[in-house]
Image (cartoon, grey):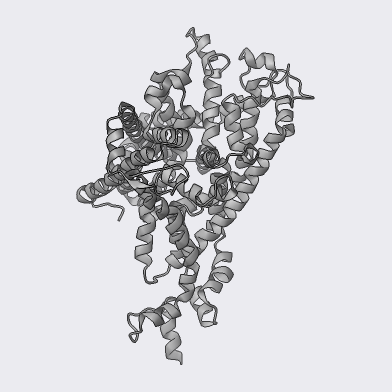
């Protein structure tokens, strides 16, 4: 009797290995409760996560209003040919890449820099105050962030333009100026997410062995040199993982933000693939066409993640899976 | 040690201090400005005189917001969406994460299939078609169900349950409890940190969501406050005759917009300090595995 209890203690799950061979049926019966818990979640994933993935067959089929959501008949690559020949698609494609590229180039390094600087604050209270304040914007709705931006940048009464007026610069209609779109997009991302994105780097920094710094100090390294020669190399694995994860988002810019910032006069730079899909699909009801565009960008995004992860594994030995 | 007195140290400290001041003011000043605008009178706002203190102090914008039936309805709808959404999500994620944190058969495959949906989702149109096909358009289900398990949050929870000490559960198992009873009677009461973090994330997610309501809801009386705020900020005309008792001389669109922003954002700001110490831990739990 004691013996069996000891065996059970080894693991919560009654395993097949290390015990008398039990059949699959017995295994499931003994661990049935775990599988009961999983019924609803599995159903959710099948319907709401894999359902839409299968729904992508619509890209190859013609949709008739009122008919099946999977379309009526096969049309092959018709919709893919259609959008590949659409100049508006290529504009959106280029805009997506540029926005993502600038985003990747600026937001991650800013978050790293922020974590490095916060880490240099010696007073613990001040440090946690700065951190807490920097987290706040993360929780604000994008609607509010863009609203805030529009109000501050208003050409008639906005604070920024009033400030420019004082130093003798004419008001700029920032939200309508195509030249300002990307800068505004990136700076609002930096404003909103830098504090939050730095959490992971901050944790990586605080887990560095203090002896490394002591050794560096003995060698005569100042604060700046310690950052360059100790901190940054030590947090490199974290940086790599964060970059790979961000690469996964390369094909999907903050679409809701772009949609909120969209005005007819900045459309030449603000139309990205997802707004293109939204307009074609939901505003003009060209479901199959929009699905084809979405599928194309989704698959491209997945391929990019796989390549990035592979390269990272080769070059730095760090990877996601 | 002479190091503390070096020139480099001083320069560094000054730059760092300025940078931190920039961060603190960069976050707070925009809100202070909008707060001032929301309390200022129409003339001061349209001429752009208001900086960080209200001019011609009045509450007209807030009166308007808290008297307008469709705005009040919007708050109610948002509260319902947030409450129902958060409850369903936290339940579904708990019953999904707990078994997946145990070495059961098929665990690896399931986690892999869940991870895949992080990097490849069905896309906007197929998801919309599915919601439409299920007859969920214009219902609460369309807002709550597609979002109910977020793979990223789920991974955080799985990691948390994995780090949970085994001995408690083992002795409960010997006492004759089954894993479902163990989860609800023993594990959950000891998981307040992760639950607080998840609830904060979920409340914020549902409260801030406007896009799903935009595409899935057709009747304006079901719109949550964020969608209404978006319409106000876009310059939608809310004025349709319901302005009785509102002083138009004092109410400008700028103060109305600012008041709308403050009224929807302040509730969230009030919640964060209470759960603040938990959520960094929660985020890191998810990140450790990376």
Q: Quadrant of the C terminus of chain A?
A: bottom left
Name the one closer to the observer, A243 or A98. A98
Q: How many marks?
A: 0
Name the one closer to the observer, A270 or B62. A270
Determine which quarter of the picture holds residue A87. top left
**Residue B9 in the image: above or below residue A200:** above
The image shows residue A156 at horizontal and vertical percentages of 56, 13
Name the one closer to the observer, A127 or A60. A60
| Residue with the most extreme top position | A168
| Residue with the most extreme right position | B245
The image shows residue A107 at horizontal and vertical percentages of 38, 35
| Residue with the most extreme left position | A314
**Residue B74 in the image: above or below residue A69:** above
Left or right: B226, with A101 as reference point: right
Q: Name the residue at 63% across, 18% down.
A: B50
Determine which quarter of the picture holds residue A11. bottom left
The image shows residue B108 at horizontal and vertical percentages of 35, 64
Visible residue check, residue A218: no
Q: Name the residue at 54% across, 55% down.
A: B89
Visible residue check, residue B81: yes
The image shows residue B6 at horizontal and vertical percentages of 37, 32
Q: Name the residue at 50% across, 50% down.
A: B147
Determine which quarter of the picture holds residue B106. bottom left
């Amino acid at each position: 009797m004691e013996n069996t209890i000891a065996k059970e203690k080894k693991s919560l799950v009654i395993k097949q290995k290390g015990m008398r061979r039990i059949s699959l049926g017995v295994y499931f019966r003994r661990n049935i409760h775990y599988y009961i818990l999983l019924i609803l979640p599995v159903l959710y994933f099948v319907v709401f996560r894999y359902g839409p993935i299968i729904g992508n067959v619509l890209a190859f089929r013609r949709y008739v209003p009122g008919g099946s959501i999977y379309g009526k008949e096969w049309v092959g690559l018709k919709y893919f040919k259609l959008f590949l020949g659409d100049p508006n698609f290529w504009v959106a494609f280029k805009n997506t890449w540029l926005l993502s590229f600038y985003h990747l180039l600026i937001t991650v390094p800013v978050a790293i820099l922020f974590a490095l600087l916060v880490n240099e604050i010696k007073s613990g209270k001040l440090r946690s105050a700065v951190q807490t304040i920097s987290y706040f914007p993360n929780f604000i709705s994008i609607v509010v962030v863009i609203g805030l931006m529009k109000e501050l940048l208003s050409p008639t009464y906005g604070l920024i333009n009033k400030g420019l007026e004082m130093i003798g610069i004419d008001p700029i209609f920032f939200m309508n100026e195509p030249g300002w779109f990307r800068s505004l997009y990136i700076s609002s991302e930096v404003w909103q997410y830098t504090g939050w994105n730095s959490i992971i780097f901050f944790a990586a920094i605080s887990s560095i062995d203090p002896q490394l710094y002591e050794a560096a100090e003995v060698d005569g390294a100042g604060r700046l040199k310690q950052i360059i020669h100790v901190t940054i190399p030590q947090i490199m694995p974290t940086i790599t993982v964060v970059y790979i994860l961000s690469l996964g988002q390369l094909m999907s810019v903050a679409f809701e933000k772009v949609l909120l910032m969209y005005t007819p006069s900045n459309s030449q730079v603000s139309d990205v693939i997802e707004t293109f899909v939204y307009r074609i699909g939901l505003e003009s009801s060209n479901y199959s066409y929009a699905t084809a565009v979405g599928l194309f960008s989704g698959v491209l995004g997945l391929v990019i993640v796989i390549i990035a992860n592979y390269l990272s594994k080769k070059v730095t030995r760090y990877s996601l899976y | 040690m002479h190091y503390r007195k070096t020139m480099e140290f001083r320069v560094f400290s000054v730059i760092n201090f300025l940078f931190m001041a920039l961060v603190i003011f960069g976050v707070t000043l925009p809100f202070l400005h909008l707060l001032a605008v929301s309390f200022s009178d129409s003339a001061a706002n349209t001429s752009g005189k208001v900086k960080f203190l209200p001019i011609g102090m009045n509450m007209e914008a807030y009166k308007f917001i808290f008297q307008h039936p469709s705005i009040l309805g919007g708050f109610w709808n948002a509260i319902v969406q947030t409450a129902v959404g958060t409850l369903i999500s936290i339940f579904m994620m708990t019953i999904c994460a707990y078994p997946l944190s145990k070495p059961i058969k098929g665990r690896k495959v399931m986690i892999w299939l869940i991870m895949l949906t992080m990097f490849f989702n069905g896309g906007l149109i197929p998801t919309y078609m599915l919601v439409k096909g299920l007859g969920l358009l214009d219902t609460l289900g369309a807002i709550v169900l597609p979002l109910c398990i977020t793979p990223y949050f789920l991974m955080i929870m799985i990691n948390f349950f994995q780090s949970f000490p085994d001995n408690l559960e083992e002795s409960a198992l010997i006492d004759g409890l089954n894993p479902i009873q163990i989860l609800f009677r023993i594990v959950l009461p000891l998981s307040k940190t992760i639950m607080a973090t998840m609830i904060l994330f979920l409340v914020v997610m549902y409260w801030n969501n406007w896009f799903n309501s935009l595409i899935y809801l057709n009747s304006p009386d079901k719109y949550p406050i964020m969608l209404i705020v978006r319409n106000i900020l876009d310059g939608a005309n809310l004025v349709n005759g319901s302005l009785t008792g509102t002083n138009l001389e004092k109410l400008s669109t700028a103060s109305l917009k600012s008041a709308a922003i403050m009224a929807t954002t302040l509730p969230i700001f009030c919640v964060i300090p209470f759960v603040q110490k938990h959520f960094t831990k929660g985020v890191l739990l998810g990140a450790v595995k990376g």
